Amino acid sequence: MAEPTTEALPVVGRSPGASRPVPPLPPVQTVDTADDAGRDDDAPPVTALPDALGAEATGAPPAETPSGAPRVSRAGRDLGAAIGVGAGLGAVVIASLFLYRPAFLLVVALAVVVSVTELVRALDNGGYRPPLPPVLVGGLLMLGLAWVRGPAGLVVAFFITVLAVLLWRLGDGPVGYLRDTSAAVLVALYVPLLAGFAVLLLVPDDGAARVLLFIATVVCSDVGGYAAGVLFGKHPMARRISPKKSWEGFAGSVTACVVIGVLAVTLAFHGPWWGGVLFGVAMAATATVGDLAESLIKRDLGIKDMGTLLPGHGGLMDRMDSLLPSAVVAYLLLSAVVPA
């Protein structure tokens, strides 16, 4: 009987030293997403790899929305919630303007308090430490003096706020003093100072109509830009700041603002038609710049929204971004074109 051997038996048709061939891996396929205009050129392409079941993970959203999930628009919003919240805010503003005009001051004051708090918290998470109390108190002072003393009162209150910030921050020592006070001054300028111009719009006898025109024009800019961007947007306006903003959307904003500007200036204020055109173009531009400016701040801080207070919108500051700079332009242009 032969001795058992531990030597491996050769395989027929193959030399003993040859290794078993490895089948080639499936190729990696580059997938073009549906919205190329919203993607950064420097970002790596999305790849599709076959999984164990033969499906492909493309990185694109699912084709069908699961039952019960909120319906998200192409622009990334929960459209139903956004419309509902917007309608509710609009009802509050209109009621405050036409039922008791000074009540609009309370609406603006509440909006300033919430927006300042959201912005300060966002800056705090980004490593800045702006002192909140002097900015809040100074912001309310700006609104009050704008109502009773006009533009001069608004400016004086702003400088008082800056001085209060500088003194308040002394208590925390020299480390980060310049960083924190600069951030606080930015907040005071960005939110309550610009919001004070909405109060200045309210001061004349026809102030309610002026405020309503200002807000309605900004809303039309948002709606016109959103609709035109979703339907026709192909050329990004500022890819690295806000990839979903397109020049086609901006054209929609300008068109909508010019239409409402001409109608309101000629019919409600009996001003020249060209004043309405100028007003509409300027408002569309400032609303867009305000939106881009806040997007730039959020990009720098690494956040998507300033808060979560408003479903479908984010924080209140995410709705104030277009209104704040537009209030300044609306006050200056209406004072020149249709003086009170």
Image: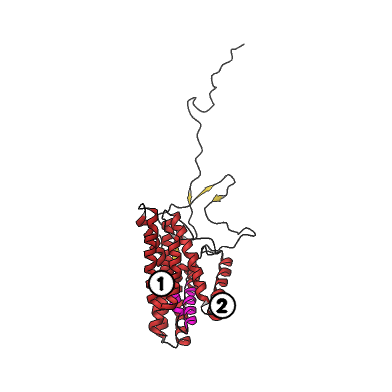
Q: Is residue 199 magenta?
A: yes
> Residue tagged by mark 1?
286
Q: Is residue 36 left or right of residue 57?
A: left
Could one spot residue 184 in this view of the protein? yes
> Farthest residue in the right direction?
67
41 vs 113: above or below:
above
Q: Earlier in the sequence, mark 2 or mark 1?
A: 2
Q: Is residue 65 magenta?
A: no
Mark 1: which amino acid?
A: Thr
Label ID, residue 95: 2
* Quadrant into which the N terminus falls: top right
Q: Residue at x 51, y 76 (%)?
A: 104
Mark 2: which amino acid?
A: Ala
Label ID, residue 166: none
* Quadrant into which the C terminus falls: bottom left
Q: Residue at x 41, y 64 (%)?
A: 187
Instruction: Give the colour scheme of this rendering.
Output: secondary structure
- Between the C-alphas of marks 2 and 1, the distance is 26 Å
Magenta residue span: 197-221
